[in-house]
Amino acid sequence: MAELITVARPYAEAVFRLAKEANSLPAWSEALAVLAAAAQDPAAVEFAANPKFSSSQVQALLIELLGARATPQVSNFVATVLESRRFALLPHVAELFEQLKAQAEGSVTAHIESAFELNAAQLDEIKSILTARVGKKVETTVSLNADLIGGVRMTVGDDVIDASVRGKLAALTARLAQ
């Protein structure tokens, strides 16, 4: 997965610069979300990988799927991605684009994994701690992960803050093994 993100990063950065110059970040965000959803559909992946269909045929299908979102710049982007055989990168491009967009808008997205369901007060407390730590507005996504045993693990960009029981046990094991 790390390799896919590495390859997707230049695409996301180029699209972000283009969207920022054209003052069309929300429009690109929508278009990339549609393209990412298509690239996660097994039927679309099979269609794009099928040698019976040319990249222009796949492009035509994606442009039709995009509808009004298919500006000339978006169409050129789709053509470039398909000619380079990078269809599978679209979800990563969309994710990286959203990170760049949030960074430009002064916010970050944090993913919170919790062993148990968090109530609103707990989530607000975690948000305020993260906001103080990163100095930016924090948007969150939350998922349950029973493997954590207890506590939470928070991911903000490349930073991981592990306040889970599993993480503390792993740290203790590492210290005892020294």
Image (tube, rainbow, N blue to C red):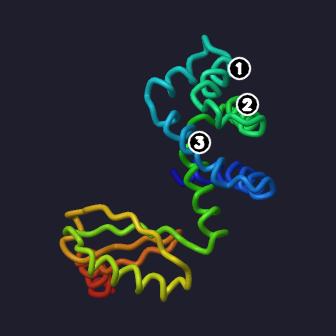
Residue at the disc numbered 2: 79
Could you say where residue 81 lies in the image, as x and y percent from the top left?
69, 36
Residue 16 appears left or right of 178: right
Circle 3 or circle 1, nearest the eye: 1
Residue 112 appears left or right of 169: right
Measured along the vertical axis of the image, is residue 1 above or below residue 140?
Answer: above
Q: Secondary structure at mark 3?
A: helix
Residue 153 appears left or right of 116: right
Give the label on residue 56, or none.
1
Residue at x 18%, y 71% (from the top left corner) = 149
Residue at the disc numbered 3: 89
Residue at x 44%, y 82% (from the top left corner) = 130
- Mark 3 and mark 1 lie on one chain; the one further toward the N terminus is 1
Could you say where residue 23 lies in the image, as x and y percent from the top left?
75, 56
Circle 3 or circle 2, nearest the eye: 2
Determine crowd level at label 2: few under 14, some 14-19, many 20+ residues with C-alpha closer than 10 A: some
* Callout 3 amino acid: Leu
Measured along the vertical axis of the image, is residue 76 above or below residue 21?
Answer: above
Q: Nearer the viewer, residue 147 or 100?
A: 100
Give the label on residue 132, or none.
none
Quadrant containing the C terminus is bottom left
- Cα distance, mark 3 to mark 1? 18 Å
- View extreme (right): residue: 21
* Callout 1 amino acid: Ser
- Cα distance, mark 1 to mark 2? 7 Å
